[in-house]
Image: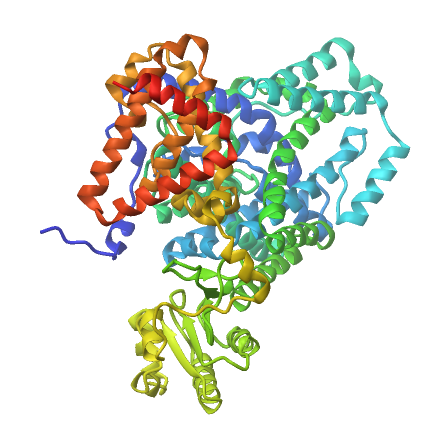
Amino acid sequence: MVEYSLDRRNDDMKVKVFHTLHNYHLKDLPKDILTGIIIAAVSIPISMGYAEVSGIPAIYGLYGSVFPIILFALFSTSPQFIFGVDAAPAAIVGAAMATLGIPAGSQEAMQYVPMMALFAGLWLLLFYFLRAGRMVDFISTPVMGGFISGIAVTIILMQIPKLMGSPAGSGELLELAEHIFAAAKNISWLSLFMGLGALVLIRTFKKLAPKFPMAIVIMALGVLSTVVFHVNEKGVVLLQSVERGLPSLVIPDFGNVDLTQAAGRGLMVAVVIMAETLLAENTFAFRNDYKLNDRQEILACAAGNIAAAAVGCCPVNGSISRTSLNEQYGGKSQAVSITAGITMALILLFGTGFIGYLPVPVLTAIVISALMDVVETHLAVRLFKVSRTEFYIFMAAGFSVLCLGTIYGVIIGILLSFVAVILKATNPPRSFRGMIPERDSYFDLSKNRFAYPIKGVVIYRFSENLFFANIKIFQEDIENSIRKDTRVVIVDASAINSIDVTAADRLDAISASLKKRGIRFYLTEHSTQINDQLRQFGIGHMIKDGMVRRTILAALHDAGIEAPYELDVPKEDETKLLRRSIAFLPAEEENTLEEFAWAFGDDAVKEIEESVHHIIEQLHQIPDIQRLSEEGLEELLDNWHGLGVLDEDELLRRIELHMDELPEELTSDRKLILHLLEKRRGKLKEKILAEHPEVLERLEQRRKKLEERLEKQNPEAVQKWKHWKEEHLKD
């Protein structure tokens, strides 16, 4: 017997070192080494740029690309995720430096920045011991997306003056705008030309050749412009040259740093690192079908940031861009990270001479390009289309960061996230239900033209747990629905999984009020858990008094309302119902498309027609049509699986009506295709007889109605089909 346990405590306590190298296949080593070298090369401009964004010299970005990456690889359970100097933490630190009034590159910044990395690492270590990974579940995507986007836009605005030959800006939106205008008054046109040119080239190649490391080429061109054309003598600022060698260990000076400020900012950075890294790691893990130990990933992030602090670098983070590159080049393990770290160490030992020749506007263009990818415009567009509330939360979080700073941005974003949860819970989806003539189910009255309420009956569905913040809406909906002839109120509580004491008391009051008015009240379709809660809150008498019924049907029976139910049809609709003929109704109205109608709603007919056209296109592309007879339509063609029996029957008929769209070379095989369609129709019949024989009669009835409707809608196609059927299937 297999025993299952939800307690993973013992497994989580086991720290796995070099987990991804266990049972390593040496055949993967050449590809991992090559991928690691590519990632190290790409990391040079990105790491240097983000180091400057955080307020420390560019060389420290390279320092942060050695030991932190290797330490992350030591503890990570992800075979492909790459760690490094990245946008979000660097941007938060840079914004913090600006808020504190600490100049970039100053001695004070050199003390503050690694201290924030240290505190970020210590906070992450605490999160590891507290098993705080679940915190990520409470940070909504709009809040995180808006926060990161706001930071990215802020840093882009900070970098714009550097394109013009001036120092970076600082502060919030108004201060940044002032810096940009001031830089524009003393603009270096050559610097601007080089920066914008580099930016255009990078963005163009990103679209045309995303795998091509254009940033490295741009750096090389920048160095060449200094060596050959001496652009530094023409107003273009260069990076400071650095000595070769590995980084020295930095001993924190706690006396010269405001520890409260550093710890507070470090906490913010730690939460962002944990959230962004875990969310991204799990996305890659799900996509590539492997499992992670989320808790150990937090430990890996902690180790990486403590290592970053030890070499004087800014906080480090999981990098989506580097990981995507790793995925593109086929990296198989953390051997890629180890290779990247060793490669960067070799560059520091033997290849730093180019840094002093690198024009600042060129590096700035690389940074701005990377930050443009961080701004989640695609998420904003998606939210705008799907959920305006979440879109406003996204924008509010972003503008809060941009206008008020990172701390206020985080606070406002989190508050808005909670507000969104409350709003969603207090205004849930709900509907009134009725019946369609000659149908047994209950339909949403607002979404079905031919659905009408049962006379004297209110059927109300509430799709959220009942608690103090939404019980008033629940009560108002019921009260507003009651008319003079209402005898019964039935609540479809299938989506209600819990109630609180306020809701329980209000349910009792609602039922008592309706009873005084001669109206019967029922709670139906819910789980037994609700019954337990009714008893616990002292209103178990509702069960004893017969107000609780397992189904809507049982409630109707108890109220003395039996089928066939009298529907409350308005006079203006009576004629419409009398003339109602299935032949004149589209499929989405007659509900003939079961799975398609459920999945696509009003677009059901459009979707099934698109499926038909897709299948016809596939028939065009089959070189040997005889394969169809060997493998079958449903096995060889897409758009077949997941269909209900009734849907597939309609799909088959619609394919037959599109037979004239087959290419001329397949015309001779029309007989084969028609035979295969008929064969598939026979399989459907066998399936129905074996599983649901009672559905067969319904299928035959629906097929007859379908023929009538299709003949009305497309008589020419139907006549062609009948001719082909007589010609090809007569034997």
**381 is higher (above) or lower (below) than 482:** above
Across and down, in percent, residue 608 comes to 45, 35
Is the residue 274 above or below the residue 460 in the image? above
Which residue extends farthest left?
Answer: 1
Q: Residue at x 32, y 26 (%)?
A: 677
For the rendered model, the colour scheme is: rainbow
Q: How many marks?
A: 0
Q: In this view of the protein, which residue sits in the foreground, 135 or 75? A: 135
Q: Residue furthest bottom?
A: 516
Residue 433 vs 676, above or below: the answer is below
Residue that appears at 35% across and 12% down: 669
Which x, y percent locates residue 356? 68, 21
Depth check: 429 or 80 in front? 429
Q: Is residue 342 visible?
A: no
Q: Quadrant of residue 6?
A: bottom left
In the foreground, 87 or 226: 87
- Closer to the camera, 482 or 173? 482
Q: Quadrant of residue 676?
A: top left
> Going by the image, does 89 lie left or right of 3?
right
Tell me the quarter of the image containing the C terminus: top left
In this view of the protein, can residue 63 be seen by the observer?
A: yes
Q: Position of residue 428 (x, y in %)?
A: 52, 64
77 relative position to 208: left or right: left
Q: Position of residue 19 (x, y in %)?
A: 30, 36
